[in-house]
Amino acid sequence: MEERKDIESLLKEEEIFYPPEEFLKTAYVKDRKALEEKAKDIETFWGDIAEELIWFKKWDKVLEWSPPFARWFIGGKCNIAYNALDRHIKAGKGNKTAIIWEGEEGRLRSITYLELYEEVQRFSAVLKGLGVKKGTDVTIYLPRIPEQFIAMLACARLGAPHSVVYGGFSVDALRDRIVDSNSSILITVDGGYRNGKVVEFKKIADNALKNAPSIKYQVVIKRLGNEVNMLKGRDYWYHELMDNVKDGYPDVEIMDAEDPLFILYTSGTTGKPKGVVHVHGGYMVGVYISMKWIFDLKEEDIFWCTADPGWITGHSYIVYGPLLNGATVYVYEGAPAFPDAGRWWSIIEKQRITIFYTAPTAIRALARYGDDWPNKYDLSSLRLLGTVGEPINPAAWRWFHKVIGKGKLPIMDTWWQTETGMVIVTPFPTTPLKPGSATFPFPGIEVDILDENGTSVPVNKEGNLVIKTPWPAMLKTLYNDPERYKKTYWERFPNYYLTGDSAKKDADGFIWIIGRVDEVIKVSGYRFGTAEIESALVSHPAVSEAAVIGKPDEIKGNIIKAFIILKSGYNSSDSLREELRQHVGEHMGPIAKPAEIDFVDSLPKTRSGKIMRRILKAKELGLPLGDLSTLEE
């Protein structure tokens, strides 16, 4: 039997990139090992961090851990919106810019902390007038516009859990989330722009509400001024409600640390979305400090995360994380390559972005257009780069580092999930980097990699990534389904949180995320992560993007099939197909060679940019496609 090479994965890179001297002098985290040593006493460690924020009443106890349920800052009283806004106003930073917003058509808005505070106050009065109070669930269905921030913060200020539904979701996906959360208020908009086209949010929302009887009121923001149907007694214009606030603002709600902050739905293997619940206290502490340390936020930074607040990345590192740190955040409504492939790079030049956090999928897609596009623009304002959403293959990492970072900037390759709330595995700007590795766990968080029997695997062997210790920003439960919470995350390896991801650790202790365990292909008893094979394929100069699936095979169990998007200037042929097979074999061993390769023009992706391999597999095997609500096209 042909053996897999010892290297096992093209995700492994021997070259180490060391941090620039200036970070070693000025970064918040200069000595990671000392921080990790301090974090061994996790209650003191997280308690000291929590002291940096404002509490109406200090906690009685930092942690109560009764697996699988953790309670953080027990007895503590706080409000995350108060810490994101009021705290900075009281510190005299009201005139600092909080949000720089740009619409796809070029419209610009700049909002200071004081202006944002006043808008949030006013909208909290609007919501209270509509019957919203502590514990009232509110659904937010908006594009990337400032009112998205305002609505989230106003809900948090009142103690009303928000459920943000990504603005690209369909009627059914929106309806299902409203019904599951039993929301009584829906906040939407007349329309938004996407790739130059108008998306009729109000029309989608109206169709969803035909079968969502819990909604009493729909608040509609006027973004485009297009004609929409307004149902009397149910639908109200945002601007009219805001103008009618005359009687002052409600007091901030004093929340228990364990009170719910939001519900965010994530994909489930059963097809029914899981409502992940996060709370005010622990989540606030986790996203505050991870934002500060990972991105080394300084007073003058302009931070741009290209995600959407409809996803956890947007919740934690567009809205709450930056605002808790008093940062200036840039938000762009549109797509990365509209009207041309220079759009993002032109924004960095124009807005003088200093920290740029984006997805490997976007990096690969923009790299496909060539170096000339980013090289047209002055990217010298950038001082730090970051990636999120999936493992980044070394070829994309190197392009991002060389072309966008000019060979100088550290890349914060972060791994985390909707459920974790905050980044779990990450470098700091002072961490030596290996292209493709997310490096080490965040201090205070212990992870392990286990085999099927729950035993820690040896160096460079793949296994199940688990988290061994509770962390403040962890999910509390699944909405109205604690049994599913226990079964999904804690049953397989008792007392350990099962991430569902496959990973390995190299001899230097660097962690390499391989991909979802359900995206691991077994061929003749050998396990291959889809990300590994895709990395090998993308490292070939002809390949722009790749996706692989396992196809059932009577002899081998599975064979590997690859779907390839070629770079401009390359044409599909049988000779190229064989060249790619040999290329994978050279890097990973002959058994990893794809048995079949299809050249395609596009790949099915979620709106957050993740390749939907299950759709490729279903089409290949002639099976039902299942839930397509998260599909981009």
Image (cartoon, rainbow, N blue to C red):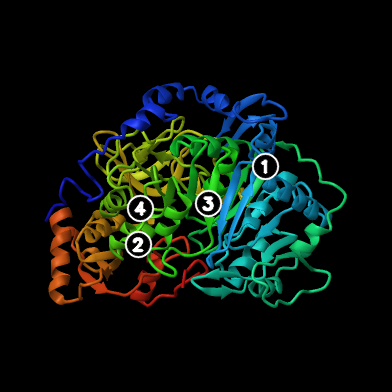
How far, Cα to Cα, is label 2 from label 1?
36 Å
Which of disc 1 and disc 2 is earlier in sequence? 1
- What is the three-letter code of the residue carrying label 4? Gly
- What is the three-letter code of the residue carrying label 1? Ala
- What is the three-letter code of the residue carrying label 3? Tyr
How far, Cα to Cα, is label 3 from label 1?
19 Å
Mark 1 touches mark 4? (CB < 8 Å): no
Image spot of residue 130 (x, y percent) = 82, 57
Of badges 3 and 1, the one in the foreground is 3
Q: Which residue is mark 1?
A: 81
Q: Which residue is mark 2?
A: 366
- The front one of 369 and 324 is 369
Image spot of residue 215 (x, y percent) = 75, 64
Figure quadrant of residue 176? bottom right
Mark 2 touches mark 1? (CB < 8 Å): no
Mark 3 touches mark 1? (CB < 8 Å): no
Image spot of residue 257 (x, y percent) = 67, 35
User: Image check: 321 left or right of 510?
Assistant: right
Of badges 2 and 1, the one in the foreground is 2
Image spot of residue 513 (x, y percent) = 34, 47
Quadrant including the N terminus: bottom left
- The front one of 282 and 377 is 377
